[in-house]
Amino acid sequence: MPVGTNATVKAMTPEDLIAVNAQIILANTYHLYLRPGHLLVEKLGGLHRFMNWQGPILTDSGGFQVFSLGKLRKITEDGVCFRSHLDGSSHLLTPELSMQVQEALGADIIMCFDECPPATADYDYVRRSQELTTRWARRCKDVHQKEGQQLFGIVQGGMHHDLRARSISDIAEIGFAGYALGGLSVGEEKEQMYGVMEFCAPILSQNSPRYVMGIGAPEDLIEAVYHGYDMFDCVMPTRNARNGMLFTSQGRVNIKAKQYEEDDGALDEKCGCHVCRNYSRAYLRHLYRTGEILASHLNTYHNLYYYLNLMQQMRMAIKENCFTGFRREYLRNQQINTDG
Amino acid sequence: MPVGTNATVKAMTPEDLIAVNAQIILANTYHLYLRPGHLLVEKLGGLHRFMNWQGPILTDSGGFQVFSLGKLRKITEDGVCFRSHLDGSSHLLTPELSMQVQEALGADIIMCFDECPPATADYDYVRRSQELTTRWARRCKDVHQKEGQQLFGIVQGGMHHDLRARSISDIAEIGFAGYALGGLSVGEEKEQMYGVMEFCAPILSQNSPRYVMGIGAPEDLIEAVYHGYDMFDCVMPTRNARNGMLFTSQGRVNIKAKQYEEDDGALDEKCGCHVCRNYSRAYLRHLYRTGEILASHLNTYHNLYYYLNLMQQMRMAIKENCFTGFRREYLRNQQINTDG
């Protein structure tokens, strides 16, 4: 899911998103709640109409941004009191308000309000936080009522497998349309993250969509799909694009680098995207260096195409029963080129 | 001609330019000479291939930017010595080098290197400058040799009709494929600018394209076409777009304004462009306020569509022999709405 924080996937039009085969996008409840406000979006016909995107949309609960962007947070049983990163205004975000905001925005899939502790939190903190997340999940389920809108539960528990197991059992007992792993990609080691994904997969519901929130690098997605996860969101393809870091079949390319100054070749010879078929590395470098908006657009277009094409390839490999080989091949290719 | 300073019309892809009916674009010699360098562009197949634009391109001579952006300029008979606004490096731009750079860039139409004095220059300065521009024009003509590339002459002379007359006669005597009025829209009053356009039109070649450089507002283009000019370039539609100032059939719209906060209507009900057909004023305001790249893109798309549609309407009005009525109607409409 490309991330469209402020009701726009940065530097992309809805037509561009269709062209790169985006099937669903994510929008951020925290940002839209603060600006332009969920009631205004509702008044204007909901998020789909507001941003002219007819495909599915998932909104997060606002929790993650409250913890990463909000100032002077205070967590109570009721919810989280925080100050806006925009104007310092004071807000209390509760499970009930999160549901209300997400219903007003009108996404197709919405998320429970959870607490996402930092990777540095100790066992006791994470345990209490996991329990709080369960109580908040029940409150979300209790008040959610918008028909046709699916509510997903979020599993917390940090890097502690016992807490993850308890969270999965708690959240499954409440019962949701889909299940997400939260609290990953928050600063932990890759091995820890992969360990949690591997541990949780067999005990998560086998008949519901499984979503790993906030990941990740292409190899993370492959690892997650390998363990049986279905959905992902991450700013990496779009944010890295705007910083000139591009994903290719030959590994990552820093398009700012001097070595591409006179490079007339495509960014990725093996890529079929519009950017790789029409522009040279030298031109992409020039656009980046001159700070042109087209740099952000073309780079984002390519990176999203790369990610969504990777997902498409994984779906095909699964259908053709050759995912394990695909995974080995992909990681080897990237390894060779990263080393080289 | 939409302005594509750094080999890109800001916030637009070549496909977008085609969609708004751009028939020719302008690129800046000064900027491309400094970065990425004309020899590199030539090596990469010329400007058309470099930026993936197959339509016609016009490059200016570099003169205007040397005077407006270059630091520590020193003008001699030979050319202009200046320091780059990017890194302070020292350069001598001469008529011969301007031809060399523009030939390397490979535009379809290129411009003579001229001196563009400020609106505040006194009569004597403008007279000497006009004479220098004539001598430089001859040197440009003498060295230009790229086949299929048209060289246009530039008329100077400030706001002084006698100097304009002399410049037209001097430049016509050398003989060029087209003629441009330079030195307008440099800070003078509109009446002065319109006066020069009106004065020059009857004595300019009747059988060559006539180009007024660096204008302008929609009403300026109407005034210029009224006097018989054919070509124009200006950053106004693109730069204003990025600042949230949009042109509509109902006058100018400052999309930042609070009054559009909940406005579900199209930016311009009478406009058939993609932006007006798919987005609300409220969404455009939201994108602008959140600093989203899509704001620059959608605003630029609309403004260029507006300008190019205005030119199209003028061509039709001329063909149907009702230009005078069209002009009156347009100015009245804008007047009413500006007053209102």
Image (cartoon, coloured by chain):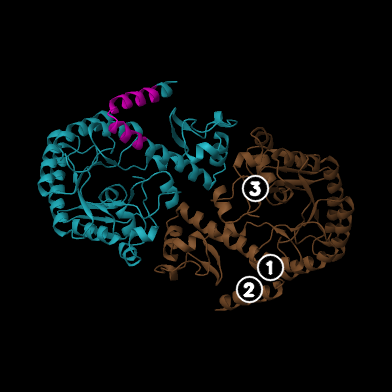
Chain colours: A cyan, B brown
Task: Kindly identify the amino acid type of the residue bearing the numbered disc 2.
Answer: Tyr
Q: Nearer the viewer, mark 3 or mark 1?
A: 3
Residue at mark 3: chain: B
User: Is residue A185 something one can see in this rendering?
Assistant: yes
Is residue A315 a member of the stretch shown in magenta? yes
Where does the magenta region start and end? A310-335
Q: Nearer the viewer, mark 2 or mark 3?
A: 3
Name the chief secondary structure element in magenta: helix
Q: Is residue A336 left or right of residue B308?
A: left
Front residue (pair B296, B87)? B296
Task: Kindly identify the amino acid type of the residue bearing the numbered disc 1.
Answer: Ile
Give the residue at mark 2.
B330
Which image quarter holds the C terminus of chain A? top left
Q: Position of residue B288 (x, y in %)?
A: 46, 59
Q: Residue at x 13, y 53 (%)?
A: A138
User: Is residue A113 something one can see in this rendering?
Assistant: no
Q: Residue at x 65, y 47 (%)?
A: B55
Q: Secondary structure at mark 1?
A: helix
Give the residue at mark 1.
B222
Which image quarter holds the N terminus of chain A? top left
Q: Secondary structure at mark 3?
A: loop
Q: Do pointers 3 and 1 mark residues of a single chain?
A: yes
Decide: is A190 above or below B91.
Answer: above
Q: Earlier in the sequence, mark 3 or mark 1?
A: 3
Give the residue at mark 3.
B55
Marks 1 and 2, Cα distance to the nearest angstrom? 9 Å
Within 10 Å of disc 3 (Cα), the crowding (few <14, some 14-19, many 20+) is: some
Q: Do pointers 2 and 3 mark residues of a single chain?
A: yes
Marks 2 and 3, Cα distance to the nearest angstrom? 30 Å
